Amino acid sequence: MSKNYRVGLIVPSSNTTMETEIPMMLRWREEVEAERFTFHSSRMRMMHVTKEELTKMDVESDRCAVELSDARCDVLAYACLVAIMCQGPGYHEISEERLGKIAEQTAAKVPIVSSAGALIEGIRAIGAKKVSIITPYMKPLTNMVIEYLNASGIEVIDSISLEVADNLEVGRLDPMNLVNIADQLNITGADAVVLSACVQMPSLPAIQQVEDKLGLPVLSAASSTVYKILNELNLKPVVPNAGSLLSGKIQAKV
């Protein structure tokens, strides 16, 4: 008999990709494992990816945690990487702790995953210390992501900013364009490539293809979030055709 899990998603109001790629990966997993997943969302208002809007949006995450706790979710995932990273180094730990306390007060203790913290954990899990990244952000926000990763002990060798400020337009980007964009990255000395440092920029269909082409581990904010969700549910992090991080060969590092 399969076991059912409820995944709570804390989502920017204009995000159209988190509720596509994360469920898709877990559906792929269902083809090889017995678990079944349902997905339950609460939204935070945000249309343009600016530091001001992101900071204002982040305040609403507390309300989202309360709403999803009412559904008795088994894990809550806050997936807006740059909203966390633009608050300064280490903020993912503050956010996760705060949301965890709010959820526990509302219902019961539940694991909290942030895409920011998950990306850092995913990079570390594959043993990478140097990465090259692609983001959809304007360059000042990409620089904040780079500073956040640097502060976490991860060196960014090179970055490409696609400079799309409208979050809806980010969600409409063709993920297969990343195959050619990745060719423009300087990966000399890099241990891995972050194909999308944003859960709104689609990348899942390209992850395995780019990994095979470059010969380096390729991950994304979304694939890292799934890796962390599975670890928090005490499930082996396996998703077919989603890159090395979800190959089943990578074990969580305590």
Image: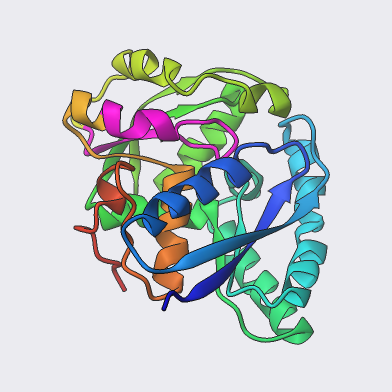
Q: Position of residue 82 (x, y in %)?
A: 60, 42
Q: Position of residue 165 (x, y in %)?
A: 69, 22
State whether residue 110 is above or below residue 239. Answer: below
- Name the colouring of the figure: rainbow
Percent coordinates x, y for residue 16 in the rendering: 67, 36
Identified at 24% across, 25% down, the residue is 187
Residue 133 image offset from top left, x and y in percent: 40, 31
Tell whether position 79 is magenta. Answer: no
The correct choice, above or below, for 32 with respect to 86 in the image is below
The answer to whether residue 209 is magenta is: yes
Q: Residue at x 31, y 58 (%)?
A: 32
Relative side of 63 to 158, left or right: right
Give the residue furthest to the front.
1
- Split into 4 quadrants, where in the image is the C terminus? bottom left
Could you tell me if residue 132 is visible in this image? no
Q: How many marks?
A: 0
In this rendering, position of residue 128 left or right of residue 118: left
Specify start and end residues of the magenta stretch as a single range. 190-210
Query: Does the image show residue 17?
Result: yes
In the rendered view of the protein, which quadrant contains the N terminus? bottom left
Q: Residue at x 57, y 59 (%)?
A: 92
The answer to whether 112 is drawn above or below residue 182 in the figure is below
* Residue 106 vertical placement versus 66 (above, below): below
